[in-house]
Image (spheres, rainbow, N blue to C red):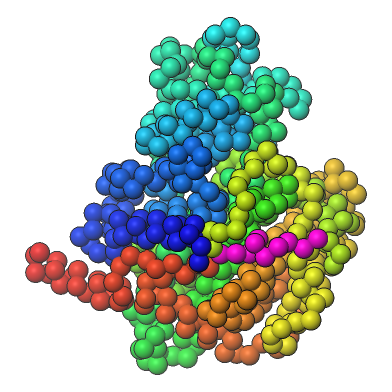
Amino acid sequence: MGEREQEVRRRIAELERAFGDPADADNPVGAAAFLAADARAEPLAAAERLLERCALNAELVPRDLGGRLTGLDTLARVIRVVFRRDAALALGHGVTSFLAAVVIWAAGSPAQRRAVARLLLSGGHLVSAYPELAAGSSFLSNELTATLGEGPESCRLSGRKAALNNMARADSLVLFARTGTGRLSHSALLVERDALPAGGITALPRHRTLGIRGCQVAGIEFNDCPVPAQALVGEPGRGLELVLRIFAVSRSVGPSAALGCADTALRTAVACAVDRGAVGADSDSDGPQRLSHARSTLAGAFVDLLLCDGLALVATRAVHLFPEDAGLYAAAVKYLMPQLLTDTAYELSTLLGADFHARDGAYAAFRKNVRDLPVIGLGAAGSAACRATVTPQLPRLARTAWCATAAAPADGLFRLDADGLPPLDLDRLSPAAGGDPLAASLMLAAGAPWPGSDRLAELVRLLAGELALLRDGCTGLDREGRSALADPRGHALAERYGLILAGAACLGVWRRQRTADTGFLARPDWLEAALIRVLRRLGTALPKIPPDHDEPLLAEVLARYREHRSFDLYDTPLAGAPGTHRARREGQEGREGRGE
């Protein structure tokens, strides 16, 4: 383990210790406190102060500007700690500011970069108003326009953005305003909130949200507001180009971090199943049909988390290793993860029964996290926009990148530690991928001599076969991809492509771990299960699968639950003493019964 990985683990452990045991009813930043704040639709003030004490904002600032940011995969790992507690907190004190700051890291002047770094390191907040990429009926009423001149306050800003998280407490705004037409239609601006004249801006009312209730979502309106000329970020008219490039960052980091919500949902479902005796030491007391359902559901949900994390890992590391291609994987993460995790949450909800509707108590965190999970697919870079990014590229990739002769990635793409990454070079990001190293790794693995079980080798060949079928299917699309979005086949092909990428990512992780250690990820059980779930979703005819193939996975789920370790690829030690929710709940109920 290198020094950088040791440092990241230390920071994660310190943040876990600061939050403490979420099941402790006396913990001011425990699950009960977050549920109460959520019911009030307010942020949990004690948790916000905790993150300020831990200087979480330093994770968002590159190291050469005084922060801790060296790798996007490690940034997601740290913020995932916060998402395990509360999505609204993670968005309000992490993701929202980062989505704005990355614009400045990518295109800001040295002075702008230093100013934003100082703001974040002092605990300030940034907000970004990205342009609307898909024009709907409200497009013109939810857009900013600006006129650019050469005087000290020659830029005049008008228009409105109706829904921005953290708007009320934003210290600076990163805005994309229409300044022209065609490809050079938008420009980026960095504006200090306090520097704007009072008559030039109007704060719009807060929006109450169904999920992430603690988020302070509100709007702002500009009324021919003068803005300093030095607010311009990058070149005028290059705003849309900038947005499309940095989507490779925002679309990968946000979903990867938000996987913490799914981790908590699975942990709560496991607690319910264990407390009821459906799995674990008391499982023989129930009927075999229900037991089988509970066991397979928990194991399947665990595998889905590993699938999502595998693709998110590749997407975040690709920004460093293959920046020209990284936008492709980031888009796939953004549209595939909400779909997979929504299905997973539905399957897990069947284990809770009536407790799914609980608003407090040991299992209430499940409903809250399931309700908050859709945030992964929201925004201007939402699921539909991400599919629209991938679909037009499929015909070209099918011709040039999905073959055994394509260049394979180094195993650095699949490493779980923080070491071995070159510095971020955001200038090399591109809206369109030049190649597809992840798909190439699948084709090469399928054609090479295969270590491991015959069943695993067959599953890998079947997945490679699906990529070959996808390549054939893409030949029927417009060769240059211009009309692929209007072709009804394009959407289905993009969905299949995302699943194939997720399977290929897990294959790469397994092969890397197989040579690195002898732990759970080095064993074939989880990879077989991941490929089986991918192939079933693709409708592939599978070889005969043993009825007990879920048992090693369930054993790992129960071990991680009892030992308080995360359900993602990293197997991170979590805060809290070993034991079931039942024991803690009974202790809490006993204290309440005694009037304590």
Query: Can residue 353 be seen in the rendering of this structure?
Result: no
Total count of labels: 0
Q: Quadrant of the C terminus?
A: bottom left
Extreme residue in the front direction: 3
Query: Can residue 562 be seen in the rendering of this structure?
Result: yes
Extreme residue in the left direction: 595
> Viewed as shown, does residue 306 lie left or right of 478?
left
Residue at x-position 29% and y-position 64%? 21
Extreme residue in the top direction: 151
In reply to whether residue 429 is colored magenta, the answer given is: no
Q: Which of 248 and 423 is in front in this view?
A: 423
Residue 197: x %, y % from top left: 43, 13
Residue 483 lies, with reference to residue 477, above or below; the image says: above
Residue 127: x %, y % from top left: 48, 33
Q: Nearer the viewer, residue 579 or 283?
A: 579
Residue at x-position 63% and y-position 10%? 149
Residue 210: x %, y % from top left: 44, 47
Type of secondary structure dominating the magenta stretch: loop
Q: Which of 359 and 191 is in front in this view?
A: 191
Residue 156: x %, y % from top left: 57, 12
Residue at x-position 70% and y-position 60%? 498
In reply to whether residue 410 is colored magenta, the answer given is: yes
Q: Nearer the viewer, residue 391 or 346?
A: 391
Residue at x-position 42% and y-position 32%? 118
**Which stretch did the figure color magenta?**
407-416
